[in-house]
Each structure stands twice: as structure tokens, then as C-alpha cells.
Amino acid sequence: MSCLHPNLQLAFLFDEKLSSFAHEISEEHVDELRKKVQSQEIKSEKLKLEQGQLSKENSGLCIQNKKLAEEASYAKELTSVVVVGVKNLVGEMIILFSVKCKV
């Protein structure tokens, strides 16, 4: 390089420094991107865990909902039986009172 013109030597030196600086910036950028990717991976894992927990909770709620629906159906049937029984009792009471009133 010593036989080159000083301006040309300066240009080569500048080019080397610029390449080195670009490499440093590139490495910093790569590191920054790696950190962002790691952060996104951590968030993704957290979301997967949360999704799993919510899925389990949803399954439990579906089972509970089914049980409650069965209980509601049973209560409705029981209410229907009670209503029929009360109607029959009222009918018998009417007959008894009408017979008692005739006597």
C-alpha cells in the first residue's frame, strides 16, 4: 500500500473502516433481531401454556354445563310430576268437598 498515492491509501483505509463499521452495525442489528426473536419465542410459549390452561378450563366448564343441563332437565321432569300430582289432589279435594257439602 505504501507505493499508492496518499489519497488512494486514504480511500482504501476509509473503505476498510467503513466495512468494519458496517460489520459492527450488522452484528449489532443481528443481536437485536436475535433478542427480538427470543422475546417472541418466550411470548409464544407463554401463549401456548395459557391456551392449554384455557382449553382445560373450557373442557371442565363444558362438563359442568352438561351436568347442569341434566340436572335442569331432571328438575323440569320432577316439576311436571309435581304439577300433575297437585292437579290430582285438587281434583280429589273438589270431589270430597262436593260430597261433604251434599251431606
Image: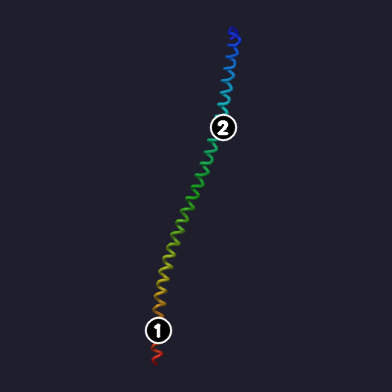
Q: Give me the residue at 55% from left, 35% from top.
A: 36
Q: Quadrant of residue 39?
A: top right
Element assignment for label 1: helix
Question: What secondary structure is found at the residue carrying circle 2?
Answer: helix
Residue 86 placement (x, y as % from top left): 42, 77
Measured along the vertical axis of the image, is residue 41 above or below residue 2? below
Instruction: Tell which circle, 1 or 2, labels the residue nearer the N-terminal end.
Output: 2
For this orientation, the residue located farthest to the front is 7
Up the image or down, 43 lies above or below 73; here it is: above
Q: Which mark is residue 32?
A: 2
Residue at position x 49%, y 47% from top? 51
Callout 1 amino acid: Ile
- Quarter residue 81 falls in: bottom left
Which amino acid is tagged 2?
Glu
Q: Quadrant of the C terminus?
A: bottom left
**Color theme of the render:** rainbow
Find the residue positioned furthest to the top. 3
Q: Position of residue 16 (x, y in %)?
A: 58, 17
Quick one: quadrant of the N terminus?
A: top right
In contact (CB < 8 Å): disc 1 and disc 2 = no
Given residues 103 and 6, the one toward you in this image is 6
Rendering coords of residue 75 (x, y %): 43, 68
Q: Residue at x 58, y 25 (%)?
A: 24
- Can you identify the residue that label 1 sits on? 94
- Badge 1: few (under 14), some or many (20 or more) residues near its Cα, within 10 Å? few
Query: In front: 86, or 66?
Result: 86
Residue ranking furthest to the bottom: 103
Residue 47 vs 4, above or below: the answer is below
Q: Which mark is residue 71?
A: none
